[in-house]
Amino acid sequence: MTRLGGSTVLVTGAASGIGRLLSLEMARRGARPVLWDLSADGLEALADELREIGADPLTGVVDVGDSAAVAVAADRVLAEVGAVDVLVNNAGVVSGMPLTELSSADIERTFRVNVLANYWTTKAFLPSMIARDRGHIVTVASAAGLIGVARQTDYSASKHAAVGFDESLRVELAQSAPGLRTTVVCPYYIDTGMFDGVSTRFSWLLPILAEDDVVAKMVRAIEHDRARLLLPPLLYALPLMRLLPARLFDAAMDVLGVNVSMQGFVGRPEGAQKSPQ
């Protein structure tokens, strides 16, 4: 099991949404939080909340899609607080537009933050984890990493990459550093504001998830070293559904309303879409 009490936990995209709540919950369980985000104001507000509950956070304004920026920030963390025990790759962005409306900059931003950042942060902290044969790397992916969704050609592809990153890393570490653990989290839409305007046809099957509930389940999954957390439970049926011919599979997703779920998407204001899913 992964013990959070006394551990150092680094969360990217920490200033809002799931990242914020996860940082607070980790601190309540006795972890030392290290917080990275692009929002200096958001980080300071969260740091104040953490100090009120007795935590001693280290914050950094970091563009996790920039490998050089990550390297500099990671050196600071290693120098000031030492090795990171739990790394939560949580930062993410979403465009929510059809492919023909996406600019080159939109697509590149999605892959920088949702995919490449996982490599830069993990490469920065993995050596010290391997040296101690102890550590836990958490990848916050998405249900869109398990299935393609209309108006998510960039986002879904990036989250498929995140799922593949976690799975490959898991089996790689099983050979080279068996004391390390990984967890991938694949939630459906969460009510953080990042996906404001999305809809669900059958809320009893595919509910818009409450962020408090998602965080509680994430913490339990990390503590119990669960390799995979899919939310809601219907997602565990996807491998069986994938056995259907593509036309029938697509028809089933249409019945569930998955491919029209983004039609009302508005999201957060430009520049504020840094929370996960």
Image (tube, grey):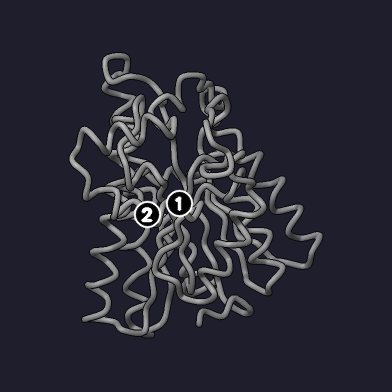
Q: Which residue is mark 1?
A: 234
* Cβ atoms at labels 1 and 2 below 8 Å apart: yes
Left or right, 187 with respect to 163, comes to right
**141, above or below 265, in the image:** below
Q: Which residue is mark 2?
A: 237
Front-most of residues 261 and 104: 261
Give the residue displayed 57% in from the left and 55% down from the top.
35
In the structure shown, which secondary structural element does the residue marked by tag 1 occupy? helix
**51, above or below 67, in the image:** below
User: What percent of the width, then of the height, locates residue 14?
Assistant: 57, 50
Q: CA distance from mark 1 to mark 2?
A: 6 Å
Front-most of residues 231 and 125: 231
Q: Amino acid at mark 2?
A: Ala
In the structure shown, which secondary structural element does the residue marked by tag 2 occupy? helix
- Work out whether residue 236 can be spotted: yes
Left or right, 255 with respect to 49, comes to left
User: What percent of the width, then of the height, locates residue 104?
Assistant: 26, 22
Left or right, 23 with respect to 142, comes to right
